């Protein structure tokens, strides 16, 4: 897809407007801080962000409406922050604590902007309908490996399988399980088979990804039966009226763990990778990397290629190598 190209002047104009907004918010944040006690610093978790407004959960899980100092960096959902109370239910965020992971996406000027922070697990949702693509699954896995988070694959709409089509699927996807990517069969619509997935989500900060129509919204509704109540509570806390569902938001799962949801995150893939990062995104390749006869082996037709040998020996699935080669050929072209 072609990127929207902005002229230098347009970019400068946007930057000027953004800078003016930042200055205005800085004044508001500083004014609020003047009446607050510098000794009162608390840790909190960013639940959602609407422009310059944050909803932060304090350590008792109460929501606080916060502004933020403008020089602290780009604060996003999932960030752990330091905040200072100003008036009842309000505060100012003065620092972002170190992130364990960040999902980033390039913005209009090619800068990488974080979408969400401190995720620990990617949940890749696939379904028999629309037909699953191993290429897309592998792209998500490469992203997860590079961000350094765990992965679980949720096979939704399992109610649509008959025994024959299920067997075909299981055969085709067996190598993922063998590589250590669990696949859990569920039906979000009939709320069937969810318990093992709920177990996997416990103790993790999860995000759901997958192509349109696989049932991500249905799954979120099944996992968060009180979603309407929660979004109502958020609207109140942010003081902004209706909580827009397009904003990235962190929810506590009723049985433990957290779920970060936003349409932008759901369709996230990965940004620019180096060839080395791509290779390392295929975790079963790791023992064979550096073992080829030629150090710059393209793993296509060179003699004594360790990866192709591993495919012959049944240690790497042929489709995984094929997808890797395809991604390698497209590096820095797709984006
Ligand atoms: N048969 C069946 N249909 C489902 C299931 N989960 C979702 N769907 C249907 O699939 C369609 C797309 O679901 P949706 O949640 O909007 O997918 P999203 O685009 O990934 O958010 C809807 O018509 C759902 O009713 C399921 O487990 N089984
Ligand atoms: Mg949806
Ligand atoms: Zn090779």
Image (tube, grey):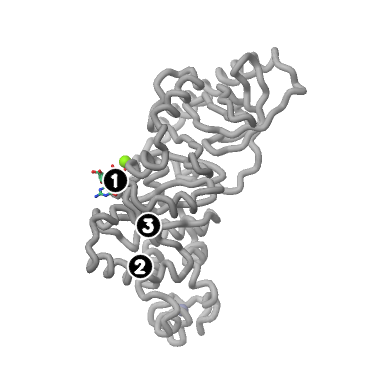
Q: Which residue is mark 3?
A: 333
Relative to 24, is 136 above or below? below
**Element type at mark 2:** helix
Residue 92, percent from left and from top: 63, 23
Residue 239's disc is: none
User: Which of pointers 1 and 3 lies earlier in the amino acid sequence?
Assistant: 1
Label 1, ligand 1: CB separation under 8 Å: yes
Q: Is residue 115 visible?
A: no
For image coordinates 74% across by 18% down, the residue present is: 37
- Per the rendering, the mark at residue 189 is 1
The image quarter containing residue 287 is bottom right
Please state which of the two labelled residues, at mark 3 or mark 2, is closer to the viewer: 2
For mark 1, does the 10 Å Cα neighbourhood hold few (<14), some (14 to 19), or many (20 or more) residues? some
Task: Tell me residue 328's x, y (percent).
Answer: 41, 66
Residue position for label 2: 173
Which residue is rendered at x = 59% and y = 18% of the image?
89
Q: Nearer the viewer, residue 30 or 220?
A: 220
Observer-side mark, 1 or 2, equals 1
* Residue in the picture at 39% in, 28% down: 228
User: Is residue 71 shown left or right of residue 144?
Assistant: right
* Residue closer to the observer: 52 or 179: 179
**Label 3 near label 1: C-beta < 8 Å?**
no
How much space separates mark 1 and mark 3, taking CA atoms? 38 Å
Tell me how far mark 3 sits from mark 2, CA to CA. Answer: 28 Å
1 or 2: tag closer to the N-terminus: 2
- x 37%, y 57%: residue: 333
Judging from the image, what secondary structure is the residue with disc 1 in?
loop
Horizontally, residue 72 falls left or right of residue 186, namely right
Closer to us: mark 1 or mark 3? Answer: 1
Crowd tier of the residue under label 3, counting other residues whose Cα lies within 10 Å: few below 14, some 14–19, many 20 or above: few
């Amino acid at each position: 897809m072609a990127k929207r190209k902005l002229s230098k002047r347009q970019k400068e104009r946007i930057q000027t407007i953004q800078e003016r907004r930042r200055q205005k918010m800085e004044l508001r944040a500083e004014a609020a801080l003047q009446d607050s006690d510098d000794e009162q610093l608390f840790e909190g978790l960013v639940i959602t962000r609407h422009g310059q407004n944050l909803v932060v959960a304090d350590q008792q899980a109460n929501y606080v409406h916060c502004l933020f100092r403008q020089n602290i960096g780009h604060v996003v959902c999932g960030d752990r922050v330091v905040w200072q109370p100003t008036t009842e239910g309000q505060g100012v965020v003065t620092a972002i604590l170190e992130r364990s992971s960040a999902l980033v996406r390039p913005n209009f000027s090619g800068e990488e902007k974080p979408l969400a922070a401190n995720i620990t697990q990617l949940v890749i949702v696939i379904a028999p309908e629309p037909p699953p693509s191993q290429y897309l699954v592998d792209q998500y896995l490469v992203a997860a490996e590079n961000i350094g988070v765990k992965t679980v694959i949720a096979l939704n709409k399992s109610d649509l399988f008959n025994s024959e089509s299920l067997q075909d699927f299981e055969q085709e996807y067996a190598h993922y399980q063998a590589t250590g990517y669990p696949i859990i069969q569920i039906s979000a619509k009939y709320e069937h088979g969810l318990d093992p997935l709920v177990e996997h989500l416990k103790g993790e900060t999860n995000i759901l990804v997958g192509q349109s129509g696989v049932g991500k919204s249905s799954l979120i509704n099944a996992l968060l039966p009180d979603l309407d109540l929660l979004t109502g509570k958020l609207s109140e806390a942010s003081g902004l009226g209706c909580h827009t569902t397009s904003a990235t938001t962190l929810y506590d799962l009723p049985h433990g763990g957290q779920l970060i949801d936003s349409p932008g995150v759901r369709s996230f893939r990965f940004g620019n990778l180096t060839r080395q990062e791509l290779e390392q995104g295929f975790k079963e390749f790791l023992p064979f990397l550096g073992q080829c006869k030629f150090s710059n082996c393209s793993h296509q037709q060179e003699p004594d290629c360790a990866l192709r040998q591993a495919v012959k020996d049944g240690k790497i699935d042929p489709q995984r190598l094929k997808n890797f080669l395809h991604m390698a050929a497209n590096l820095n072209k797709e984006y």
